[in-house]
Amino acid sequence: MLGYGCDGDSHWTPVAVRECWRDRGRITEYLTAHDWDDVDWVRQGVATAVRDYESCLAGSLAADLRIRGSTSSG
């Protein structure tokens, strides 16, 4: 089985993380442009997950990435 969920360290290299971080504005725009309070999204827990992700992007993620980046090679 391949994918970011089961073998993320193979995919999320420091370079890939930096590219994703540079593109976070587009991700934030996408998340804020959608109505995550739709009944189906709420029932599936997506609305809560999106809000948690938005909070992480706006808050602690930058520091977390710096810590992870300083402990990895590449």
Image: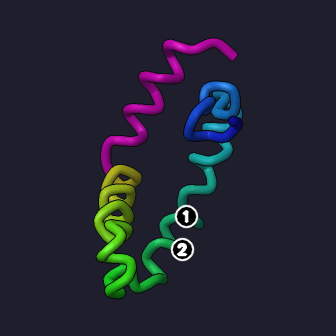
Q: Residue at x 67, y 28 (%)?
A: 13
Residue 30 badge: 2
Label 2–label 1 contact, CB within 8 A: yes
Q: Position of residue 26 (x, y in %)?
A: 59, 66
Q: Is residue 40 magenta?
A: no
Q: Quadrant of the N terminus?
A: top right
Residue at figure coordinates x 39%, y 42% from the top left: 61
Q: Residue at x 69, y 26 (%)?
A: 10
Residue 25 figure quarter: bottom right
Kindly identify which residue carries mark 1. 27
Q: Give whichever of 53, 67 is nearer the camera.
A: 53
Q: Disc 2 versus disc 1: distance between alpha carbons?
A: 5 Å
Q: Amino acid at mark 2?
A: Tyr
Residue 53 location, quadrant: bottom left
Q: Position of residue 47 (x, y in %)?
A: 33, 71
Horizontally, residue 68 falls left or right of residue 72, namely left
In this rendered view, identify the residue nearer to me: 3 or 15: 3
Q: Is residue 8 above or below residue 45?
A: above
Crowd band around label 2 with a 10 angstrom C-alpha radius: few (<14), some (14–19), many (20+): few
Q: Quadrant of the C terminus?
A: top right
- As shown in the figure, which amino acid type bears the numbered disc 1? Ile
Horizontally, is 51 left or right of 13 in the view? left
Above-or-below relation of 34 to 9 = below
Q: Which residues are magenta?
A: 59-74
